[in-house]
């Protein structure tokens, strides 16, 4: 097929690769414009999709928005059979949705209608869901409301958001290739009205650990915020990120209190022990290594 690909982060790259490997003609890759990054934020850093598309010899377009008549006309002029969208980051106006001959398909990282929206992987982990997955959805004007053509499921287990996103990206790529290969025979199934939830974008303020919450919720938060923005607590005026933690079958009192020399911390119910941490500006390290150079004695209130 003649495809316009639309995506931005690492999650979208496997789908781009899979479409190219399947022999489709990718006439353009739309992605978010380069963002400040690099050393001290002085350099503009292209998105993962832009870098991969350039390596594949695919023309890249990175408009700041798609609401202008000129941008919509330029999109329509590509004469695409279909648009494939994976975590693009811009809302597609109706003229863009209508332009490809066969419409627009989206790779969405949840089992719709659960977790419509921007952060389905993180929200599924935070909620304690047992499983999640990927849906290949025919796009319409509503937020992730379109009918589903194909889906796949995975168990969440003890994975972090980063690990789970990697697995879902690979699954989504395979499902999209399968969908396109069998598109004529597929029937899009409307999402049910029951079970709708929304995965709001992660606010950095949510990453601060609330020690009044049960240990199981704190541990989920740690996994959901890994790799970014990273769950954190503050001690001696410094933020310390917790990248991994284990729950302990203890019932200490004093929420947010360090209860032993191993950095075990009391929660609203139970306790956690960070196993991988990161100081501001530093590299990830074990909690044991942290305590050697940055003592946090028992009795410290976080």
Image (cartoon, rainbow, N blue to C red):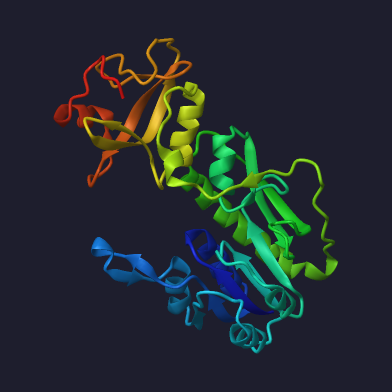
Indicate whether 125 appears above or below 169. Answer: above
Residue lying furthest bottom in this view?
77
Q: Residue drawn 71% across and 78% down?
A: 95
Position in image of residue 102 (x %, y %):
76, 76
The mark tally for this picture is 0
Position in image of residue 41 (x %, y %):
28, 64
Residue 44 appears in the picture as rendered: yes
Q: Residue drawn 62% across and 35% down?
A: 129
**The one of 288 and 181 positioned closer to us in this rendering:** 288
Q: Residue 237, located in which quarter of the rendered image?
A: top left
Q: Residue 146, located in which quarter of the rendered image?
A: bottom right
Indicate whether 248 appears above or below 285. Answer: above
**The one of 55 and 275 positioned closer to us in this rendering:** 275
Residue 23 appears in the picture as rendered: no
Position in image of residue 139 (x %, y %):
72, 65
- Check the picture and name the quadrant holding the N terminus: bottom right
- Check the picture and name the quadrant holding the C terminus: top left
Decide if residue 35 is on the left or right side of residue 141: left
**The one of 119 and 248 positioned closer to us in this rendering:** 119
Indicate whether 202 appears above or below 60. Answer: above
């Amino acid at each position: 097929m003649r495809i316009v690909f639309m995506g931005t982060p690492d999650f979208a790259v496997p789908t781009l690769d899979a479409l190219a490997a399947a022999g489709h003609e990718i006439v353009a890759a739309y992605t978010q414009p380069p963002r400040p990054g690099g050393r001290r934020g002085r350099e503009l850093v292209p998105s993962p999709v832009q870098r991969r598309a350039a390596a594949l010899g695919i023309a890249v377009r990175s408009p700041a928005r798609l609401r202008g008549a000129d941008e919509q006309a330029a999109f329509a002029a590509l004469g695409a059979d279909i648009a494939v969208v994976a975590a693009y980051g811009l809302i597609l106006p109706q003229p863009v949705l209508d332009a490809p001959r066969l419409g627009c398909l989206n790779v969405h990282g949840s089992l719709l209608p659960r977790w419509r929206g921007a952060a389905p992987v993180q929200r599924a982990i935070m909620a304690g869901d047992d499983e999640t997955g990927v849906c290949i959805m025919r796009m319409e004007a509503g937020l992730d409301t379109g009918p589903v053509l194909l889906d796949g499921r995975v168990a969440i287990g003890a994975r972090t958001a980063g690990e789970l996103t990697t697995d879902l990206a690979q699954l989504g790529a395979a499902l999209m290739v399968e969908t396109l290969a069998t598109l004529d025979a597929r029937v899009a199934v409307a999402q049910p009205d029951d079970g709708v939830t929304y995965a709001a974008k992660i606010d950095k303020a949510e990453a601060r650990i609330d020690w009044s919450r049960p240990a199981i919720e704190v541990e989920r938060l740690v996994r959901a915020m890994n790799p970014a923005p990273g769950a954190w607590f503050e001690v001696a005026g410094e933020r310390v990120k917790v990248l991994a933690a284990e729950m302990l079958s203890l019932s200490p009192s004093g929420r947010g209190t360090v209860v032993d020399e191993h950095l075990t911390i009391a929660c609203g119910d139970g306790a956690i022990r960070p196993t991988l941490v990161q100081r501001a500006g530093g590299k990830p390290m074990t909690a044991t290594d942290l305590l050697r150079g940055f003592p946090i004695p028992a009795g410290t209130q976080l």
